[in-house]
Amino acid sequence: MSNESRLKQISDPTLMQTFSNQLRKEEKIISFVPTMGGLHDGHLSLVEEAKKRGDITIVSIFVNPSQFGENEDYDEYTRDIDGDKEKLNKLGVKVVFTPSVEDIYPKGFQTFVEVTELQNCLCGLYRPGHFKGVATVVLKLFNIVKPHIAVFGEKDFQQLQIIKRMVSDLNVCVEIVGMPIVREEGGLAISSRNMNMSAEERERAQSISKALYMIRDEYENGCKQVEKLIDIGVKILTENYIFNIDYFEIRDSISLELIKEAKPGSLVAVAVRLGETRLVDSLML
Ligand code: AMP
């Protein structure tokens, strides 16, 4: 039997629900990793964690149109379903859920979920409607896949907090697990969008994590004033010719409110545009 035959691909939401209902009847713990595909080591770290936490791990691959703005890269977004399936199979994942856009948003679809306050800062300001699309699709995926546990990356820190809030506010019975950012050797947070950068842009992009680490060092050396810490970070970016900074901020990591004094657990978050590529990174002090 070939390796490939061990991974079951389900595309129909009703079949997925039936399959999950059966697993639940058998008292299996379902762990779930929602993705948009183009799987890399960041995604795979979530899958590894999900495997540890559940009896059966389900990964979804769905490039969600409702979370892309009109001028964003929905059409160009990396799609490599065969490559993704190979990677999941190698990790021993048993089920990949790959619905179509029509499956998720059939004709007449008109119900959306919005986490109203947490979406009003950071990436939410630069990508209007993005988190409404994310919250809606994640809730739909939860209702279809019926997981006990779902694993998300801190790479999208605001998204993780929004999903935790949604799950708590709407009494959704899914445990949300956040996992640390996986980085390339030079420190750049791994992202499907890194491939869109030139070698020179990639080199300059290393300064994003350097700026975050420098802020952490200064903080650990006693500097708590947010304004000063951010100045240090911005200086490193501009020295590397990164001038298009959407935001560079320190916030409370749960409420996402702005703070003046950094403290243990505060979130340092940055988003920049480098050529055509938008890069997001963060760390917790
Ligand atoms: P995406 O396919 O971009 O929607 O990402 C799917 C999941 O993978 C999300 O929970 C992301 O936060 C997570 N993820 C993406 N890149 C990384 C990374 N470098 N390290 C950890 N998690 C990541």
Image: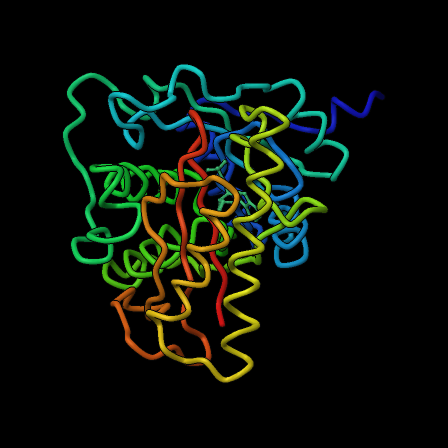
Q: Work out which quarter of the rendered image holds the N terminus and state it.
A: top right
Instruction: Report the front residue among 269 and 151.
Output: 269
Residue at x 42%, y 55% (from the top left corner):
234
* In the displayed structure image, the side of residue 282 where residue 181 appears, left or right: right
Instruction: Report the front residue among 28 and 250.
Output: 250
Asked if residue 252 is positioned above or below residue 189 in the image, the reply reads below
Instruction: Report the front residue among 277 and 62.
Output: 277
* In the displayed structure image, the side of residue 95 where residue 16 appears, left or right: left
Q: Return the residue found at the far front.
A: 239
The answer to whether residue 152 shows anywhere in this view is no
Residue at x 68%, y 29% (from the top left corner):
7
* In the displayed structure image, the side of residue 233 where residue 217 appears, left or right: right
Residue at x 54%, y 29% (from the top left corner):
37
Asked if residue 33 is positioned above or below residue 148 in the image, the reply reads above
* In the displayed structure image, the side of residue 179 where residue 270 appears, left or right: left
x, y percentage for residue 54? 61, 55
Residue at x 25%, y 45% (from the top left corner):
124
Asked if residue 119 is positioned above or below residue 126 in the image, the reply reads below
> Which quarter of the picture shows residue 202?
top right
x, y percentage for residue 229? 42, 69
Count of all numbered marks drawn on residues in the image: 0
The answer to whether residue 201 shows anywhere in this view is yes
x, y percentage for residue 57? 61, 45
Q: Return the residue found at the far right.
A: 1
Asked if residue 191 is positioned above or below residue 159 in the image, the reply reads above
